[in-house]
Image (tube, coloured by chain):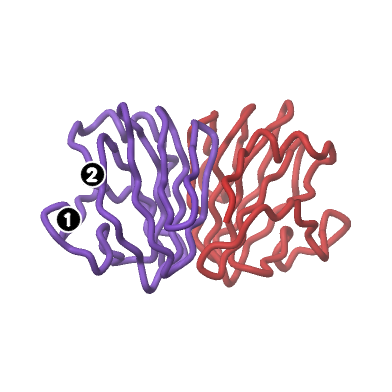
Chain colours: A red, B purple
Amino acid sequence: MEKINLKQKLSLFTEHWQPKIISEYNGNELRVVKLSGEFVWHDHAESDEIFLIIEGHLTIHFRDKVVELDPGELIVIPAGVEHKPVAEGECHALVIDREGTVNTGATGGERTVENLERI
Amino acid sequence: MEKINLKQKLSLFTEHWQPKIISEYNGNELRVVKLSGEFVWHDHAESDEIFLIIEGHLTIHFRDKVVELDPGELIVIPAGVEHKPVAEGECHALVIDREGTVNTGATGGERTVENLERI
């Protein structure tokens, strides 16, 4: 049981859309991720999802609206709600999902990361 | 489903050791809290607990060590692990617990908040 410094963890990698597991919590995974550009439309059938912005700006598109997130802001996306994150610049975020949740949900494709690295 | 600005939520109240629920996530509660002074030794038998520091400094005492937390740092305290948070100045934190987790665990006492306010 050690403390975790989010910016230090984010300094350990450079790739985009590759969440890294930094801890577990009640059957969920805390992940940090660097986002840049446009992701795919997807949802997570079995898990709500938290995005907390650490650095940069994130736009999350939903089918009926758009939400703009800055550092210190978070959103909880309920299970089953389709969303598409888009980062114009580079955005760093803490993401929390139920253990084993696939980053692209059922959409799949080349952005899918099968086995998340732990850092 | 709206975004949440943590500092804006923390601006809505002044009292210490009174967690406020700001959202739910996978059967857990996201809470913000202002801490000042010394809390009681306690543990949460049924829930891990996340502390993420937003502002100020927090010392968490464990039976075998002490952890010092600054803004942007978090710790996951496993269920059943005794801890005592102490804030020398005022500290603002995001805390995540399983729904219904009592802030003082089984220790009880005057610091117990029975029904957490939602803000």
Mark 1 and mark 2 in contact? Answer it, CB < 8 Å: yes
The location of residue B81, given as percent across then percent down, is 43, 65
Within 10 Å of the Cα at label 2, are there few (<14), some (14-19), or many (20+) other Cα atoms?
some
Give x and y (percent) for residue B112. 17, 57
Residue at image coords 70%, 55%: A21
Q: Position of residue B20 (x, y in %)?
A: 26, 47
- The image shows a total of numbered marks equal to 2
Q: Quadrant of the C terminus of chain B?
A: top left
Image position of A16 (left or right of A85): right
> Does A26 sit above or below residue B109?
below
In the picture of the structure, the residue carrying the numbered disc 1 is B113
**Quick one: which residue is furthest to the right in this view?**
A110
Kindly identify which residue carries mark 2: B17
Q: From mark 1 to mark 2, how far is it between C-alphas?
A: 9 Å
Side (left or right) of A28 relative to A106: left
Vertical relation: A62 (above or below) A66? below
Which numbered disc, 1 or 2, marks the residue that appears first in the sequence? 2
Q: Disc 2 marks which amino acid? A: Trp
